[in-house]
Image (tube, rainbow, N blue to C red):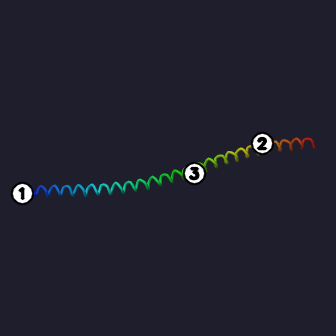
Amino acid sequence: MQRRSAWTSFWRWNIKKEREARSAAEADAAALRAELATTQEKLAAADEKLAAADEKLAVAGAAQNEIDSLHREREAVKLRVESMLAKMDELL
């Protein structure tokens, strides 16, 4: 009888420990899921910031191209005006 009681106590103790371990594992899993959700939210926010920065960079690049084009056009006009002024000086 004592032997059966000892085995019963052992099995109850073993089941109790397994339940405690499962409970701890589930708590850890829940904490990790929450951490993952937070990390995913941060990643999504970072992706949005990156997309906004890429858009600003594209706009800045287009603006720089326009400025370069205007500088080239200005230089061409300057050369034409200098050429005309030189011809006018020759005529006078």
Foreground: disc 3 or disc 2: 3
Q: Quadrant of the N terminus?
A: bottom left
State the mark number for residue 79: none
Q: Which residue is mark 1?
A: 1
State the mark number for residue 76: 2
Foreground: disc 1 or disc 3: 1
Chain-order first, disc 1 or disc 3: 1
Q: Are marks 1 and 3 in contact (CB under 8 Å)?
A: no
Q: Where is residue 2 drawn, in percent x and y? A: 7, 58
Within 10 angstroms of label 2, few (less than 14), some, or many (20 or more) residues?
few
Residue 70 horizontal side relative to residue 7, left or right? right
Q: What amino acid does circle 3 point to?
A: Ala
Which quadrant of the figure has residue 26? bottom left
Q: Which residue is mark 3?
A: 53
User: Which residue occupies 40% across, 56% down?
Assistant: 34
Q: Are marks 3 and 2 in contact (CB under 8 Å)?
A: no
Q: CA gap, disc 1 to disc 3?
A: 77 Å
Q: Where is residue 21 drawn, in percent x and y? A: 26, 56
User: Which residue occupies 44% across, 54% down?
Assistant: 39
Within 10 angstroms of label 1, few (less than 14), some, or many (20 or more) residues?
few
Chain-order first, disc 1 or disc 2: 1
